[in-house]
Image (cartoon, rainbow, N blue to C red):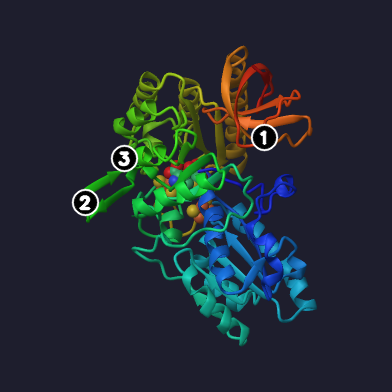
Amino acid sequence: MELLEIAPKVHDEARQGEAYAPFALDNTEYKKKFYIESYGCQMNFSDSEIVASILNEEGFGATRNYEEADLVLLNTCSIREKAEQTVRKRLTEFRKTKEAKPGLLIGVLGCMAERLKSKFLEEEKLVDLVVGPDAYRSLPGLIEEAETGQKAVNVLLSRDETYADISPVRLNSNGVSGFISIMRGCNNMCSFCVVPFTRGRERSRDAYSIVAEAEDLFSRGFREVTLLGQNVDSYYWEDEAKGEFVTFGKLLEKVALVSPLLRVRFSTSHPKDITEEVLQTMARYENICKYIHLPVQSGNTRILQLMNRTYTREWYMAKIDQIKSIIPDCGISSDVIAGFCTETEEEHADTLSIMEYSKYDMSYMFFYSERPGTLAARRYKDDIPEETKKRRLQEIVELQGRLSRESNQRDIGKTFKVLIEGESKRSAGDWMGRNTQNKVIVFSKGGAGYQKGDYVDVKVTGCTQATLLGELA
Ligand code: SAH
Ligand code: SF4
Ligand code: F3S
């Protein structure tokens, strides 16, 4: 799952000029305006698009300027302590706006809602509304309550809410790639992780509504969809009408069949659950992207056991081998945690060596941050000193830097099919797009009449650590 703590605004500045902004066109019809900022993973960003849809129905139009909003919402993340601190800081900033504009309503949505409801409402008096990830349908009623000066809260988690029937309003889309939530919650109890507590039990969304959403995006010019879930491989939906069982492999195939021109991606895969069926389906369809985010977390079996990841070092390595034998050109990325409870230097070295073995193209890397209420917080002591955690993380980051450079250098001279996502942020004379392995490629427009959403063949001529540079082939 991609973590976007560094990009707090839904309305990504870089994309603003060209953004596909369905709400902007009819903004004037709305009597009231809302502003939303999202933190955390893509699931949260995707939820903000559901919230936008619910609010549009209620007569609220989106604005990119919080100072003109009647309702300011923060869709929050609890994954690490730092994520929570960022949100608190932002809330204090909004309080100033509220002092100048007493009618303004401020709401906290998402993963911090459940954990901190009483704190936000009572102690901090910063917030008028607190709404958990499964309670967005109750937003209209809660807003009404809050407008009468009451504190409005709904943090109930659900066993079946998937928002399947709500058509998301694409907030900061480039008009080419869109996200589709296919499931919610998580049943894995990784001992470090707060997600099962903030988002509740796992449930899969109706496959028909997923395919319909992909078809709708395609008909509106989108050329890439990413299927989202905390653990997509355990997607499972029973079509009672047809007596059919839809696994993740089958779902991938259904979405791939929408059009050969529609690229399909997915995130996140759990190493214990990704099946051969999924790998074979990826190999069979050209438009299913050859890229897997397969978080390892640690390369040491004892630590993996403490983390409750339910696989061993050897099992993970065998999974990497299997991926490479079925999909030889597959891009692979990872999440890594440095300094989990009781981790020794040798165990940390196992993490470095498994990264080397897997040759990750990219990784998201963190040091362990204890989260209240998790299994690890209850069972183990957070005993690795902060300097040690940071030093180990630094070693992981440096190694990944080298692996990314080496991976990019191996691509020099190769030609890739690239989906153009838009102009390069740095230069209007260049396009930016991705290859099937999810690597970003920047190349000169070269006078040819292409547009974003087109597929072009690009030959790689150079690279930086993070980006391939190329020219039209
Ligand atoms: N469902 C995804 C990950 C969701 S959270 C999966 O299973 O892979 C994204 C990443 O944040 C995790 O993979 C993990 O590397 C990191 N993370 C989660 N909890 C953390 C914690 N307490 N401290 C540090 N990193 C954490
Ligand atoms: Fe958290 Fe593990 Fe679920 Fe991922 S699979 S969300 S890390 S509990
Ligand atoms: Fe995502 Fe953060 Fe919640 S990573 S699921 S928004 S705790």
Q: Position of residue 460 (x, y in %)?
A: 64, 17
Give the foreground label among 3 and 1: 1
- For label 3, the residue is 250
Query: Which is more toward the observer, 415 or 82?
Result: 415
Image side of residue 71 versus residue 129, left or right: right
Give the foreground label among 3 and 2: 2
Image side of residue 175 versus residue 299, left or right: right
Three-letter amino acid code at disc 2? Lys
Marks 3 and 1: CB-CB under 8 Å? no
State the SS at label 1.
Answer: loop
Query: Which is more toward the observer, 415 or 26?
Result: 26
State the SS at label 2.
Answer: loop
Give how far apart the Cα atoms at labels 3 and 1 are: 32 Å
Which numbered disc covers residue 157? Answer: none
Q: Earlier in the sequence, mark 3 or mark 2?
A: 2
Which numbered disc covers residue 451? Answer: 1
Give how far apart the Cα atoms at labels 2 and 1 are: 41 Å
